[in-house]
Amino acid sequence: MNRSALLMCSLVLAGVASAAQASATLTRVSGGVRVNQGVEFVEAFEELALRPGDRIMTLENGRARITFDDGCDLDAGPNTMVTIPETSTCAGGQALTQNIAPGGTEAVGAGQSFNWRRALLIALPVAAGVAIYERNRDDDATVSP
């Protein structure tokens, strides 16, 4: 095998090995913090290796620090879900960050019932305006010369 082919094989193997490694680590965990690495959310812990696509969820009392392999830190405050990007945020990667419902683990709006009070506060003035318009509308309007 010539040297260039050997070099190519070495580079490919090095690329595969680096792709299998973590791209970030959970370096600080306090309060309620969960992680989803593809199956379900489970209790998170410090020094947990993270890969692109993993999701970190902090609960109402939770905080987490994600440290990327290049030393870049990303902090997640309470009621936040962060999806680990392909590259660190310092290197231009965009972490998908979402606020979650206070006191729960559902996304904002999930499980909420219809707000009748708000609906009535909107519908009643609109209905009154329509009724007043209809009452004052002059169907027999004639134009005098």
Image: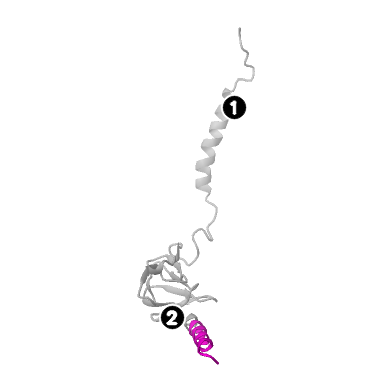
The segment highlighted magenta reads 1-16
Residue 31 in percent (x, y) is at 37, 73
Task: Check if residue 15 falls in the magenta segment.
Answer: yes
Residue 145 in percent (x, y) is at 61, 7
Q: How is the image coloured?
A: one colour
The residue nearer to you, when weighing 63 against 11, is 11
Query: Which residue occupies 54% across, 56% down?
Result: 113
What secondary structure prevails in the magenta region? Answer: helix
Vertical order, 55 against 110 (above or below): below
Circle number at residue 34: none
Residue farthest along the right direction in this orientation: 140
Residue 65 in percent (x, y) is at 37, 73
Query: Which residue occupies 58% across, 25% down?
Result: 135
Circle number at residue 134: 1
Q: Which residue is mark 2?
A: 49
Q: Is residue 6 left or right of residue 140?
A: left
- The residue carrying pointer 1 sits among few (fewer than 14), some (14 to 19) or many (20 or more) residues within 10 Å by Cα, namely few
Query: Which residue occupies 45% across, 74% down?
Result: 34
Amino acid type at image mark 1: Glu
Amino acid type at image mark 2: Ala
Residue farthest along the top direction in this orientation: 145
Q: Which callout, 2 or 1, points at the residue further toward the start of the chain?
A: 2
| Disc 1 secondary structure class | helix
**Of marks 2 and 1, the one in the foreground:** 2
Q: Quadrant of the N terminus?
A: bottom right
**Label 2, label 1: how many angstroms apart (C-alpha)?**
67 Å
The residue nearer to you, when weighing 14 against 106, is 14
Query: Which residue occupies 51% across, 41% down?
Result: 122
Q: On the image, which quarter does residue 70 sit in?
A: bottom left
- The residue carrying pointer 2 sits among few (fewer than 14), some (14 to 19) or many (20 or more) residues within 10 Å by Cα, namely some
